[in-house]
Amino acid sequence: MRPACSAVALGLLTLLLAACSTGGVNSIWTEPGGAPSPYRKLAVIGIANKTSVQRAYEDNFVGALKAIGVTASSGQAVASAANRTGDQNIRKALEHSGADGILVTHLIAEPARNSEPPARATAIPQAYRRLDLYYNQVYREVMTPGYYADYQKLRLESNLYDAKRETLVWSGRSQPLDPDSERTIGQIIADVVAQLRLDGYLP
């Protein structure tokens, strides 16, 4: 494992603040039937094993969304750390936020692949389809000690859920993060927001 990558296993904050991706989003899945009316009020929930990393996700997304005129609030603004341990607590907090869309994001570790995944995905895991199932699964995985210790590639995965139906409408992953590049996590997140606009989910 490269030295820069080993640092991520110990703590992701350095990578998030100084690392980057090759640009763009792939593995994009969209709900069949076409995009609904654009979401104009989003709650952003970052999932990470460090509070500082979680805030980096959420603050950068909120800033990028507000820059295009979307009302956005961070998970830290709608739910305390103690209330993030279960989907029921998250659901109650989101109801009070008044959001019409919920964006959940986290860093995903995946094994090495000989080829890049397709730009568009035709299927998603069953657990992704509902907010409660996805949140509980990802929260358990990310909080498990050593989850990022033996990765080959890291990507930022972002899933957009319709707040009323609590079902997935859009999913995408960033290109692999490259610790040797100068692109920041803010630029990676800007790619995700731009793709969401291109696909019709943001105004």
Image: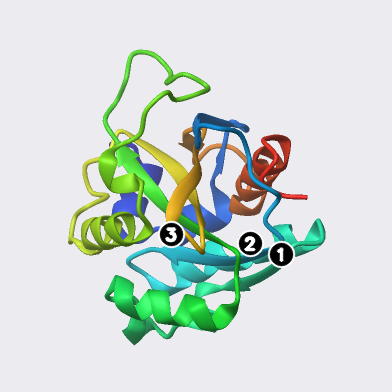
For label 1, count other residues whose C-alpha is less than 10 Å away and answer few (under 14), some (14-19) or many (20+): some
Tag 1's secondary structure?
helix
Residue 193 location (% of width, % of height): 67, 47
Residue found 53% across the figure and 83% down from its top: 96
- Disc nearer the start of the sequence (3/2): 2
| Residue bearing the label numbered 2 | 60
User: Disc 3 vs disc 2: which is toward the camera?
Assistant: 3
When asked about the image quadrant of residue 82, the answer is bottom left
Q: Which of 35 and 24 is in front in this view?
A: 35
Q: Which of 55 and 45 is in front in this view?
A: 45
Q: How far apart are marks 3 and 2 (CA)?
A: 23 Å
Residue 197 location (% of width, % of height): 72, 42
**136 lies above or below 91:** above
| Residue bearing the label numbered 3 | 166
| Residue 158 appears in the rendering | no
| Residue bearing the label numbered 1 | 63
When asked about the image quadrant of residue 13, the answer is bottom left
- Disc nearer the start of the sequence (3/1): 1
Image marks 1 and 2: residues in contact by CB distance under 8 Å? yes
Q: What residue type is labelled 1?
A: Gly
